[in-house]
Amino acid sequence: MNPLKVALGEGRTQIGLWQALANPYTAEICAGAGYDWLLFDGEHAPNTPQTLLAQLQAVAPYPVEPIARPPVGDPAIMKQYLDIGFRSLLIPMVESAEQARMLVSATRFPPRGIRGVASATSRASGFGSNPRYLVDAHEDICLIVQIESRAGLDAIEEIAETDGVDALFIGPGDLAAALGHLGGADHPDVQAAISDALARIGRTGKASGIFALSVDDAKARIAAGASLVSIGTDIGILMKGARGLRASII
Ligand code: 3PY
């Protein structure tokens, strides 16, 4: 079973780290650091299916769930990510139940959905050696959708009620821009909208998540019921460490 999917279904907190360096070596270091999940970003990082595959292979020996974020919720791209072996996906900018249903369908083979079938060319099915994959792959797929626009906020309940959606995840940066506060995710109006969104998701019974702005923000969101919480990025850790080390000497 996909441990992230199980944990979200049971309401257990899952702490994650964003991976934007697009590098298998640093991904492997982070994979051994005790996080529940790592997010490999195809939206705002220089990733291709090839670089994502290398990172997926690098973290495979570690007890951490890799999640991939495509640049857009496109079934063709999702199909590639699933075929190379990701089973957890984070889809940006989801704004309606109709879109959520289409995304769920993109993760299921016919007759359950529209996912195209690769057999011997699919790493996910052991290059065709696991025929059960076609039958039960959907049971392990964890689909997380991002709420980060006014339309997304308006549609929270209907998106959360979509079968096959495992969690709704707030993107504070895009949401701030959508609410007229570009670059101001910590603005009180944005923070209030996020609190309201997380509370509404909680009332639907679906898991909620967020890209936390700081460790204190993460703690507050966890206390308020968010279960899928990222607490930093590989780039942020590297930059802070490099600058701090330089500043520690003359
Ligand atoms: C956002 O803050 O908008 C995100 O999607 C996190 O990268």
Image (spheres, rainbow, N blue to C red):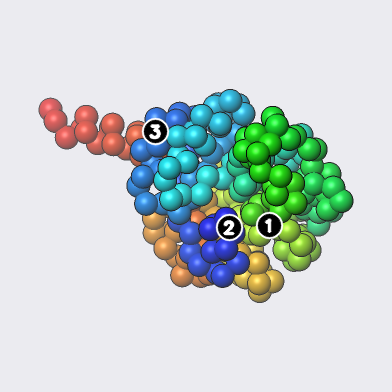
Query: What residue would you read off at disc 1?
Result: 139
Q: Amino acid at mark 3?
A: Thr
Work out whether residue 103 or residue 238 is closer to the camera in this orientation and state it.
103
Q: Is residue 101 above or below residue 9?
A: above
Taking the spot 51% from the left edge, 29% from the top edge, the residue there is: 54
Query: What residue would you read off at disc 3?
Result: 26
Residue 158, percent from left and from top: 78, 63
Quarter that holds the C terminus: top left
Would you say residue 135 is visible in this rendering? yes
Taking the spot 66% from the left edge, 43% from the top edge, the residue there is: 130
Within-10-Å neighbours for mark 3: few <14, some 14–19, many 20+: some
Q: Amino acid at mark 2?
A: Met
Work out whether residue 246 or residue 168 is closer to the camera in this orientation and state it.
168
Distance from Cα at disc 1 to Cα at disc 2: 8 Å
Residue 223, percent from left and from top: 46, 70
Q: Find out whether the residues at labels 3 and 2 contact each other: C-beta distance under 8 Å.
A: no
Q: Find out whether the residues at labels 1 and 2 contact each other: C-beta distance under 8 Å.
A: yes
Taking the spot 61% from the left edge, 55% from the top edge, the residue there is: 169
Per the image, label 3 sits on a secondary structure element best described as: helix
- N-terminal of the pair, mark 3 or mark 1, is 3
Within-10-Å neighbours for mark 1: few <14, some 14–19, many 20+: some
Residue 37, percent from left and from top: 48, 50
Ligand 1 within 8 Å of the CB at mark 3: no
Q: Residue furthest left?
A: 250
Query: What residue would you read off at disc 2?
Result: 1
Closer to the camera: disc 3 or disc 2?
2
Ligand 1 within 8 Å of the CB at mark 1: no
Per the image, label 2 sits on a secondary structure element best described as: loop
- N-terminal of the pair, mark 1 or mark 2, is 2
Distance from Cα at disc 3 to Cα at disc 2: 26 Å
